[in-house]
Image (cartoon, rainbow, N blue to C red):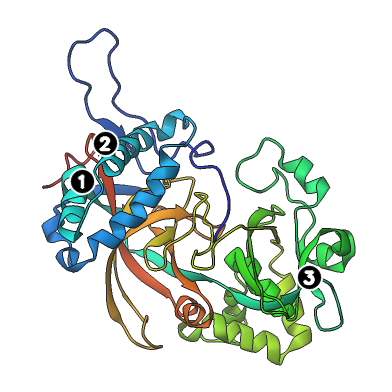
Amino acid sequence: MAALLSLLGALSGALTLGAAVVPGSAMAAPPAAIRLAGATLEPVAFADLEGWAGDDHLAAFRTFLASCRAVTRAAAPSRAAQPMSQGLKAACARALAHPAADAAAARRFFEDGFGAYRIQPAGGGEGFLTGYYEPIVEGALTPSAAYATPLLAVPAELKRLLAGRSDGRPAEPWLDRAAIEDGAVDAKRYALVWLKDPVDAFFCQIQGSAQVRLPDGRLKRYAFAARNGHDYTPVGRILIARGIVPKEEMTLDRIRAYIEANPAEGRELMRMNRSYVFFREADLAPEEHAIGAQGLPLTPGRSIAVDRTLHVYGTPFWIEAALPVSAPGTAEPFRRLMIAQDTGTAIVGPARADIYFGAGKEAAAIAGRIRHAGRFVMLLPRGVEPATGGPPAR
């Protein structure tokens, strides 16, 4: 989900500092070592990555370069995040000083400047991929019978609870979805825009961003600002548990169809996800995409959301999967270099990612049917290695 969070300051101790420089030593510093909680990192040669040679490395480089501008501005990270963040800053300095001019140069940049490590989850098996998008919905700046469901700005009381926090959520859960929708927050005071469809509002909150088309044709953009602190509950999981939708058929379209066909039950279903997202108006050009947690516009097909307690924004990941991108029921090879630029409450674990597919109905359809296993390869800057597992393969 797209969200405006600080870059590195709130990272947990999942990435743990290993080797250190000995004060006064004239010897070169040993490689910085990291441990990835819940997984091992095994070196792999770039030549052994299926599809590596055929990817568009220049597209990946441009997305990485966008991240670099945020990486170089970031405040000093926690001690646990220092090896990775410092390694990325060094790689970014090279990228910004000498941008790749073509795909061949971009490929050399990644192969020369990084080592590839396959993420092996501690419990075995593969990682897991989902998709997300930016909704384009209808709305108005004033409420009416036609436009009655608000997207809310952060209420003053919640702002006080968020003081000093960088993750966009209070230390303890605040009002839940039902209480907020029932009037515990003054909608007339805090509404940024009023939507035509309450189901649209629900999906805007799940995705963490929105493009709202006003009656006069203007387009307003809204980005994640904060959440109420309640855990996110996937309503699709509830429909599966109740036997309403088979697991293999679960998509966002099926969720929406159930809610629209069963208004009372659908309203109750949405309220079972007690998490609630608040927004802010975003100043974006029409061609720019939703803002991710790294604080910059995302790139369709290249940006991913990851677990921010385990990974550092700007990290490149090679992802291998078979995904139904072109149509439901297909299983097309997906072999692509992606950049971590976002996060989400449902994105938990070392081999877990949400792929950003863009804005609008087509992107929504693709994102809504991605619930698939995938293999993850993490690119570590040269000079950064796993605490165990040996040096990167060449």
Residue located beneath label 3 in the image: 141
Q: Where is residue 66 shown, x and y percent of the image? A: 39, 51
Task: Mark 1 and mark 2 in contact? Answer it, CB < 8 Å.
Answer: yes
In front of the other: 138 or 338: 138
Task: Mark 2 and mark 3 in contact? Answer it, CB < 8 Å.
Answer: no
Which of the two discs, 2 and 3, labels the residue nearer the N terminus?
3
- Give the numbered dot on residue 384: 2
Q: Is 311 displayed left or right of 224 in the figure? A: left
Which of the two discs, 3 and 1, labels the residue nearer the N terminus?
1
Query: On screen, 42 above or below 136?
Result: above
Task: Mark 3 and mark 1 in contact? Answer it, CB < 8 Å.
Answer: no
Q: Residue at x 50, y 78 (%)?
A: 368
Residue 282 falls in image quadrant: bottom right
Q: Where is residue 161 shown, x and y percent of the image? A: 76, 42
Residue 146 falls in image quadrant: bottom right
Q: Residues within 10 Å of mark 2 (few under 14, many from 20)?
A: many
- Give the numbered dot on residue 149: none
Query: On screen, 134 above or below 32?
Result: below
In front of the other: 102 or 320: 102
- Please tell me whether mark 1 sits on a helix, a strand or a loop: strand
Camera-side mark, 3 or 1: 3
Camera-side mark, 2 or 3: 3
Does any portion of residue 92 appear in the rendered image?
A: yes
Q: Amino acid at mark 2?
A: Val
- Number of labels in the image equals 3
Does any portion of residue 123 appear in the rendered image?
A: no
Residue located beneath label 1 in the image: 115
Q: Where is residue 7 shown, x and y percent of the image? A: 50, 42
Q: Where is residue 172 shown, x and y percent of the image? A: 72, 45
Q: Residue at x 21, y 25 (%)?
A: 30
Q: Is 197 displayed left or right of 368 in the figure? A: right
Q: CA distance from mark 3 to mark 1?
A: 50 Å
